[in-house]
């Protein structure tokens, strides 16, 4: 780790942390902002941005393996792969290419504007951030998920019990 102080090491030594959850990057090329800026018709994702997220997540998963094999023996690391889940109509999401709230040129919600009526059908709150409904699904899947492509090498429930 050279001259840099790795945060997990500091958390381990100074605070006593022993269990770590590293969360990957989601499909950033599918945010409404990326779709509107890169798409001709607003219907497809920016694959270059998504490929960057995939590469980052592959390296982060590898880092989790490295930490689990070479870090302190009393520490455990898991990886949450934010690109592994699907957020489609089977989960009630019918709007994935637009934000729930009216957004300004910066992509964030315009203050004092009325958001969409049915927030549970939208994947994105503003041009960048997921809605509460999406965050709940991700949290539940992270906590007690059985998909090793999403939680690796275990979910948070098993991390807590280990």
Image: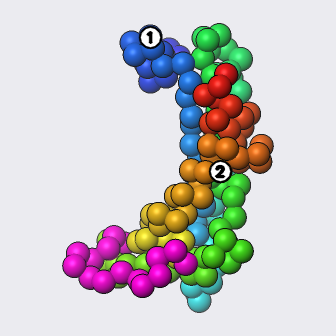
Question: Viewer-proximal residue, 15 or 144?
Answer: 144
User: Which span of residues is magenta-colored?
Assistant: 107-121
Q: In this picture, is 131 found above or below 102?
A: above
Q: Residue at x 54, y 71 (%)?
A: 123
Rendered location of residue 134, percent (x, y): 55, 63
Give the position of the C terminus as an image quadrant. Answer: top right
Q: Is residue 115 left or right of residue 137?
A: left
Q: Is residue 101 left or right of residue 160?
A: left
Rendered location of residue 42, percent (x, y): 57, 85
Can you identify the residue that label 1 sits on?
13
Dividing the picture into quarters, in which one does residue 156 lie?
Answer: top right
Can you identify the residue that label 2 sits on?
141
The Cα atoms of the two marked residues, 2 and 1, are separated by: 30 Å
Badge 2 density bin: few <14, some 14–19, many ≥20, Cα 10 Å: some
- Of badges 2 and 1, nearer the viewer stands 2
Q: In this picture, is 149 found above or below 124?
A: above
């Amino acid at each position: 780790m050279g001259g840099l102080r790795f945060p997990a090491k500091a958390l381990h030594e100074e605070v006593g942390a022993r269990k770590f959850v590293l969360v990957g990057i989601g499909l950033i090329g599918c945010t409404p902002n990326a779709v509107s800026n890169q798409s001709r018709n607003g219907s497809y994702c920016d694959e270059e941005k998504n490929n960057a997220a995939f590469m980052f997540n592959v390296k982060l998963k590898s880092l989790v393996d490295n930490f689990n094999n070479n870090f302190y023996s009393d520490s455990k690391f898991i990886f949450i792969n934010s690109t592994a889940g699907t957020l489609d109509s089977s989960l009630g999401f019918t709007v994935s290419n637009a934000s729930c709230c009216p957004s300004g040129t910066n992509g964030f919600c315009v203050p004092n504007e009325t958001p969409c009526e049915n927030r549970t059908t939208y994947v994105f709150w503003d041009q960048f951030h997921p809605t509460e409904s999406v965050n709940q699904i991700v949290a539940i899947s992270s906590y007690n998920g059985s998909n090793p492509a999403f939680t690796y090498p275990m979910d948070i429930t098993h991390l807590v019990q280990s």
